[in-house]
Image (cartoon, helix red, strand yellow):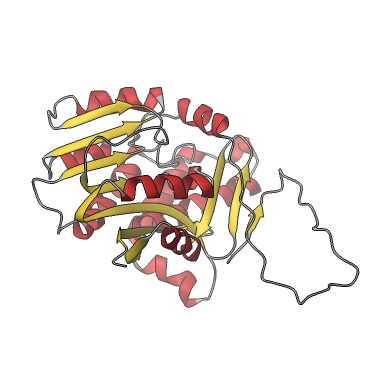
Amino acid sequence: MTGIEVSLSTPRQSPARDPVPPVPPVPPVPRITDIDYAKVNRYWGKATPSILGPYMMDDFGFPASAGDFRFREESRIVQRLTRDVKRDGTILDLGSGIGVWAENFARRFSLVTAVEGSRTLFQSLQSRCAPYHNIRPIHGDVMTFEPDARYDLVFLGGLLMYLNERDVIALLRKLDRCIKPGGMILCRESTVRGKAVALTGDYQVVYRSVSDYERIFEQCGLSVRHVERNEPYVLMEMGIELIEKWRQAVPVRFQALRTVGHLTYFGMRLGNPWIRRVPKAMSIAFPMLENHFFVLGKDAS
């Protein structure tokens, strides 16, 4: 099992040591990091209700088309991963944000229940989904939401990273009970390559590794049918991390973020897919953050 690296805003404490260990050391058990949900709610309550805001792509000078590109490419992956879900299927979209995924599902399936806790994002979700009579928008906490139906597909589009491990397990076990036979849970989560990283400032999140999530899914009695790296996310994250380095190196008055953001985005688009292959070819762990799709089903055992 992997441990958790805590950001510098939280001091690390050295574990107590016995002078003479009476038994051989055992593998460490990962410390469960608590997330301040009040801070999470405040952050998303002030989030920009745009295609860039929920994607964490605002404030980098990107054009809105960067968010449209990422969603369009991700939706192609999701369509492929959910191609076996029947057209008259029922969908649960937890943590719906501004409703782009709920709208996408409504065009493909019979009924979509979209749950969002942020009042700001929920208002945008309502406006976007108003033309669709097969979307049921619900403003509420995803942890206290009680499913009143069984679903062919449950979509978690970047939700688990904002929950501590206890609540991830509790939520997934609850969702497992409301999946129809042959149905699936589809998670899209930001990931790291090594130990999990917890951010403990105003933006509270835990970035876990693929193996962390696989361990958690197993604890919940869910089988991992498929894991796939989210390449559109990785491409845009490369641009974000390059711009972050630019902001650290250049004084604010010379940053010209709008120009740099536009140039970076279009450079990434022109260099794709070869630019994504450069770090791997050079054995460089870049970008720091990745993202993966996890297709989950009921454990056959």
User: For this rendering, which residue is in front, 71 or 34?
Assistant: 34
**Placement of 151 over or under 41, stated as above or below:** below
Q: Is residue 186 left or right of residue 183?
A: right
**Placement of 64 over or under 12, stated as above or below:** above
Residue at x 60%, y 49% (from the top left corner): 198
Q: Is residue 292 shown to the viewer in this render?
A: yes
Residue 68 screen position, x and y as percent: 29, 43
Residue at x 44%, y 42% (from the top left corner): 57
Residue 248 screen position, x and y as percent: 64, 47
**Placement of 158 over or under 182, stated as above or below:** above
Residue extending farthest right: 19
Residue at x 53%, y 65% (from the top left corner): 193
Q: Is residue 226 left or right of residue 120?
A: left
Q: Quadrant of residue 36?
A: top right
Q: Quadrant of the N terminus?
A: bottom right
Q: Quadrant of residue 178?
A: top left
Q: Is residue 10 left or right of residue 199?
A: right
Q: Quadrant of the C terminus?
A: bottom left
Residue 237 screen position, x and y as percent: 45, 53
Q: Is residue 94 left or right of residue 256?
A: left
Residue 60 screen position, x and y as percent: 48, 41
User: For this rendering, which residue is in front, 279 or 197?
Assistant: 197
Q: Is residue 158 shown to the viewer in this render?
A: no
